[in-house]
Image (cartoon, rainbow, N blue to C red):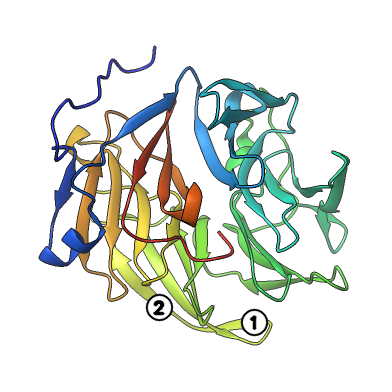
Amino acid sequence: MPVMWEPSTRYPDPAIRALDPSFEKYHLPLAGVERLATGCRWAEGPVWFGDSRTLLWSDLPNDRIMRWDEITSTTSVFRHPANFANGNTRDRQGRLVTAEHGRRVTRTEYDGTVTVLMDRFEGKRLNSPNDIVVKSDGSIWFTDPPFGIAGHYQGHKAEQEIPGAGNIYRLDGVTGRATIVADDVLGPNGLAFSPDESILYVIESRSRPRVIRAFDVDGEGLRNGRVFLDAGPGTPDGFRVDVDGNLWCGWGMGDPELDGVRVFNSSGAPIGHIHLPERCANVCFGGRGRSRLFMAASHSVYALYVNTQGAAGG
């Protein structure tokens, strides 16, 4: 059952907490957390479509992509079945690009046709593509951990054909050639570029505690992998980066006080927290000016206006 929740009737909303004075720059005192939709089994991968003023997100276990309309405030099913869609983003031509736990990466064309961009690497089926971003050169970068192989979403087990704890791939936007850019991240999950695309951040979800790693982007590859931050008792899943380089991370699991979105600056220091009644998996920026934070959190999707903009490509 969805968690019982009521929006705060007070401003500033007590759900929004500064962990460092620098966060006050991003906090709008007359903005509060809103619940836009509920009734999902596990909400993931929100992505904003400003041309239609709609938000799409995955309800992974229910094998569907959902759609929320900003004009009418109504929610509907955008696609079912959806091959267990997980992470979503848009390419630089505005098309939906999706990482599917059903072992493929797809693009939805303007006419609604679904094009399979990749489902195998060197003849072997992908594991369970998880999250996805598009760089300004048109290349598609995605994580492929073996999470879905156990069949906890599909109802049956499948053979893992690509060994290891998961790869990060780069799919060339012109040639379609796929390369592995990192194979040493334990359970790679959410990923995002810094605003200038010089750094790729990746959540390593199989380490204990979880960590967010950073790589320097070197042409078509990565180098200098390092731990950017240790999540401690938190459980980061997916995240997006704003134009100032801050990471807005889905957070939670364990202690209910940790549920929500934890914000870190570009040095890895925590500066703010948005408390939600459910663990948050992933976020995106959207709305007019890309200044509305959409948060996919377990059963529900929430939103909050903030005083920053999301970086392009997320």
User: Which dot marks residue 226?
Assistant: 2
Query: Closer to the camera, 174 or 62?
Result: 174
In the picture, which quadrant includes the C terminus?
Answer: bottom right
Describe the element under mark 1 as helix, strand or loop. Answer: strand
Residue lying at 45% horizontally and 58% vertically, measured from the top left:
240
**207, above or below 220, in the image:** above
Marks 2,1: beta carbons within 8 A: no
Is residue 47 at least partly visible in the picture?
yes
Number of marks present in the image shown: 2
* Crowd class of label 1 (few under 14; some 14 to 19; many from 20; radius 10 Å): some
In the picture, which quadrant includes the N terminus?
Answer: top left
Query: Closer to the camera, 196 or 252?
Result: 196
Query: Closer to the camera, 215 or 301?
Result: 301
Residue lying at 44% horizontally and 53% vertically, measured from the top left:
206
Q: Is residue 274 left or right of residue 144?
A: left
Who comes first in sequence, dot 2 or dot 1? Answer: 1
How far apart, in angstroms, are the residues tagged by discs 2 and 1? 15 Å
User: Which dot marks residue 108?
Assistant: none
* Crowd class of label 2 (few under 14; some 14 to 19; many from 20; radius 10 Å): few
Q: Is residue 274 left or right of residue 90?
A: left
Residue lying at 68% horizontally and 33% vertically, measured from the top left:
84
Residue lying at 34% horizontally and 46% vertically, measured from the top left:
305
Q: Is residue 66 left or right of residue 205?
A: right
Q: Position of residue 103 (x, y in %)?
A: 74, 44
Which mark is nearer the camera, 2 or 1? 1
Q: Is residue 178 left or right of residue 278?
A: right
Q: Amino acid at mark 1?
A: Gly
**90, above or below 67, in the image:** below
**Location of residue 156 (image quadrant):** top right
Describe the element under mark 2 as helix, strand or loop. Answer: strand
User: Which dot marks residue 221?
Assistant: 1
Q: Amino acid at mark 2?
A: Arg
